[in-house]
Amino acid sequence: MCRVLAADIGAGSYRVMEGIYTDRGLDMKELARFRHAPVRKNGHYYWDIEEMRDNLVRVVRDAAKRGERIRSIGFDAFGSDFGLLDSGGALLDRPLAYRDKVSDGIYEAYFKDEKAIYARTGAAYATTGTAHILKGMVLQRFPAVKHAARLLFLPDLLAYFFTGATVNEYTIATTSRLLDIESGQWDMGLIESLGLPAHIFHPLSASGTAVGTLKKEISEGIPNLRGTVVTASACHDTASAVSAVPYARGCSFISSGSWSVKGIVCGSPYTSDTACEYKMSNEGQPGGKFRLIRNITGLWILEECARAWRAEGMDLIIPKLAVSAESEEDVPSMIYTDAPDFKKPGNMPEKIRTYCARTRQKVPGTPEAVMRTVVNGLALEYRRHNEQLEDVTGSPVTCMYIVGGGRHNRLLSQCAADAAQCPVICGHPEAAAAGNILVQLHALGAVSSMDEFPRIAAKDVPEVRYIPGRKEKWEERYGRYLELAR
């Protein structure tokens, strides 16, 4: 028996999952889940990393008081966001949230000519990454940048809080847009040309690296935490999630959460002009593989809608709303989720209504109609991305495999199958945590090969398949959608 814990950090919530691996397979259980959102301070949005740390420490200690010894703990999170340490190891400020205004205008000023560096980095810059945030902080003379000695991404930072040791894990670093795609190391030439402090970028470590044992104040008095290590799993949540996806030729994965991270797994990067034009990024995957992906603004829009509705006194939960929307009238309206209208927090239902009015569509009135309007746009964007993948790789996309919390949204899954006219298979709802756990088990020697990961994960949660239909209706909608997505 081997018991490990995974802390999976999302933009709307974070959770701690327990994984117990025996000869019968993997048994996963959620130990705790916390909702969170960026906090505003001095005109900027930050992550309350101290509250997150304290909650996670409490859950780990409570879990260790019961059951078997905890062999390892791993952290994964969304990409881009980071903390800065000074030369004494003190955190200089809370990590800025990727949706903060500090990155406004950085793409237009520094990255609009992406082709000039795409062959080097294999990265798209249209969506915010570490490069944008850090450049904005330099331009706005944030004190933390001036005094920084080391950059740690969110999972690296949490590992540091738990152990006192510093590691920069490879897969999360590839979300920065600051790596040389061929060497897999920091592109110091690019970093220096952007005027970023090169000395804060330290050597990278592979997924599965042991960071260190728990600090004494965390493990003290609890025998089940004696010798527990923190493992740098696949620290980017998408890298973890995709580790649990079975490889099938022609299948595009979707890690569905606040973002819909959609793409394919490949053995080498794609750095053509066409890939650049489609804003695709090559990110690192454990085992020397790559993910050719594009970040599509996903269920965050509905999460923002729910926040606005709660402020109005309506206690609406997105999965339940999706179920009720299935039985409501099929709304023809749609949004392009990556439109500038939806990039920042705010009254999202009102933004959607304004967008539909401006684009001469039926304005959704009820929460169910808003849900369908967002889902229509997402489903059609999945189809557009399939066609772009085919254009870049020369290979057809014949199915889509959805993992993450979005797999529970039956309306989205069926609409995606109908819009793209290909089967949709829904896998593990906690794929990021499952991948995190499996990388730890591999590092401990409990699982012999990464090739076993999908089989082990699939035994834990059965797959659900959606068959495409209603082709004529979705063909008509797709023509209108392409006009919105120009």
Image (tube, rainbow, N blue to C red):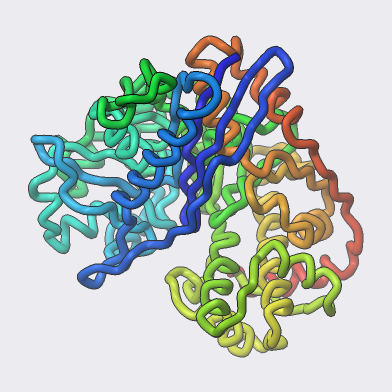
Q: Quadrant of the C terminus?
A: bottom right
Q: Nearer the viewer, residue 210 or 193?
A: 210
Residue 137, above or below 89: below
**Residue 151 in picture, x, y percent from top left:** 23, 40
The residue drawn where x is 72% and y is 79% is 369
Specify whether 334 is left or right of 121.
Answer: right
> Residue 301, position in %: x, y?
56, 68
Q: Quadrant of residue 46?
A: bottom left
The image quadrant where one finds the N terminus is top right
Whether residue 365 is situated above or below residue 452 in the rendered picture: below
In the rendered image, the vertical position of residue 192 relative to residue 332, given as above or below: above
**Residue at the spot x=78%, y=78% of the render?**
332
Please indicate whether residue 272 sits to the left or right of residue 98 in the image: right
Across and down, in percent, residue 190 comes to 25, 41
Whether 286 is drawn above or below 37: the answer is: above
Q: Nearer the viewer, residue 376 or 191?
A: 376
